[in-house]
Image (cartoon, rainbow, N blue to C red):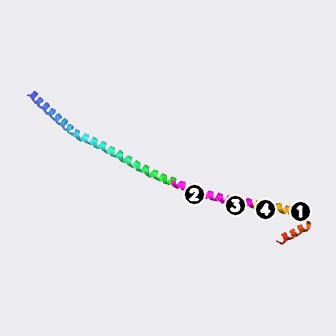
Amino acid sequence: RETAKFGEVALLKKLRIKNEITAVELRRPDIIKSLEDIATMKAVINQTTDQQTGRITEMFNGLINLLQRRRDELINDIKEKSRGKIERIDRQTQSLELDLKDLDNTVLVSSMIVEEASDDHVQQLCDLVMDH
């Protein structure tokens, strides 16, 4: 009888274990579904990250392009102003060089006239210069 009792207890334990195994096996589809959901969430996170990264990159590229265009405009403005200043200086230099040529010619001609002039003419020239 004890053997039969022992057999019944063993059988009950066996049934309980089989029930526990069945309960665990019934959780398998839920676990698989959770794993699939996690994989989907990871994919969504990666996709969102890629999209946000792309938008940020586009935004910064736009800002960089805008800054580069503004830099180029400012550089061109400076170069144009510099060219204008150089052109004015060149015109002033040419004018001064012409004035210097005229002065040299005047001095040369005046010197030649004074060398060739009589003493009376030199005196008249001096009087003229002193009066002015």
Residue of label 3:
92
Disc 3 and disc 1: Cα gap in Å? Answer: 36 Å
Q: Which residue is mark 1?
A: 116
Say which residue appears at 50% left-offset and 54% top-offset.
Answer: 67
First in sequence, mark 4 or 2: give its number: 2
Task: Report the magenta residues as a range.
Answer: 69-98
State the image coordinates of residue 35 (x, y, percent, origin top left): 28, 41
Question: Residue at 63% across / 59% down in the picture?
Answer: 84
Q: From the viewer's perspective, is residue 129 above or below residue 86?
A: below
Q: Residue 63: horizontal and vertical position, in percent?
A: 47, 53
Residue at 64% of width from left, 59% of height from top?
85
Residue tagged 4: 103
- Left or right of 98? Residue 18 is left
Q: How crowded is the residue under tag 3: few (<14 C-alpha within 10 Å), some, or many (20+)? A: few
Q: Amino acid at mark 4?
A: Leu
Given this view, does label 4 or label 1 mark the residue nearer the observer? 1
